[in-house]
Image: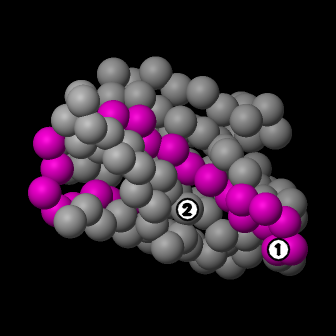
Amino acid sequence: QVQVVESGGAVVQPGGSLRLSCVVSGTIWMIYDMAWYHEAPGKQREWVATITNSGSTTYEDSVKGRFTISRNNAQKTAYLQMNRLKHEDTGVYSCYVEEGDPENKAGNWGRGTQLTVSS
């Protein structure tokens, strides 16, 4: 069974920085895409960024230039470095991991970690 656990959430002042982590454990054949999603209070969860197993990255427009997604394949970990944080970045950040063998990929979610941007 695969487990995805996020950490690093905190209360941060506007303009501040924070790094979130996403650790994958369990019986894993291979990890493909790893992605971060954001659920703001009262809103639906939305995609933030994705990193492929070869390191290619894509970002939602509102975070381009402020957030950086990275991963350590050996440690089965993904990171989200968030800079110049804004009030609207507040919410739960969840990690999505695609894993399995090439013929049978599965998606896995973590429970999320809370970020609050407040002065």
> For residue 97: magenta?
no
Res 110 label: none
Question: Would residue 12 be found to the left or right of residue 2 on screen?
Answer: right
The image position of residue 84, as x and y in percent, is 75, 50
Q: Is residue 111 above or below residue 69?
A: below
Circle 1 SS class: loop
Res 41 label: 1
Q: Quadrant of the N terminus?
A: bottom left
Q: Quadrant of the C terminus?
A: bottom right
Looking at the image, can residue 72 be seen? Answer: no
Comes first in the chain, label 1 or label 2: 1
Q: Is residue 80 above or below residue 71?
A: below
Region in magenta = 21-45
Q: Nearer the viewer, residue 44 or 10?
A: 44
Local packing at callout 1 (Cα closer than 10 Å; few below 14, some 14-19, many 20+) is few
Predominant secondary structure in magenta?
strand
Question: Would residue 26 be found to the left or right of residue 64 on screen?
Answer: left
The image position of residue 4, as x and y in percent, is 35, 64
Q: At label 2, which amino acid type do we have?
A: Ser
- For the point 33% across and 22% down, the residue is 54
Which residue lies under the disc numbered 2? 94
Question: Would residue 85 be found to the left or right of residue 5 on screen?
Answer: right
- Residue at mark 1 to residue at mark 2: CA–CA distance: 14 Å
Q: At label 1, which amino acid type do we have?
A: Pro
The image position of residue 27, as x and y in percent, is 13, 57
Residue extending farthest to the front is 103
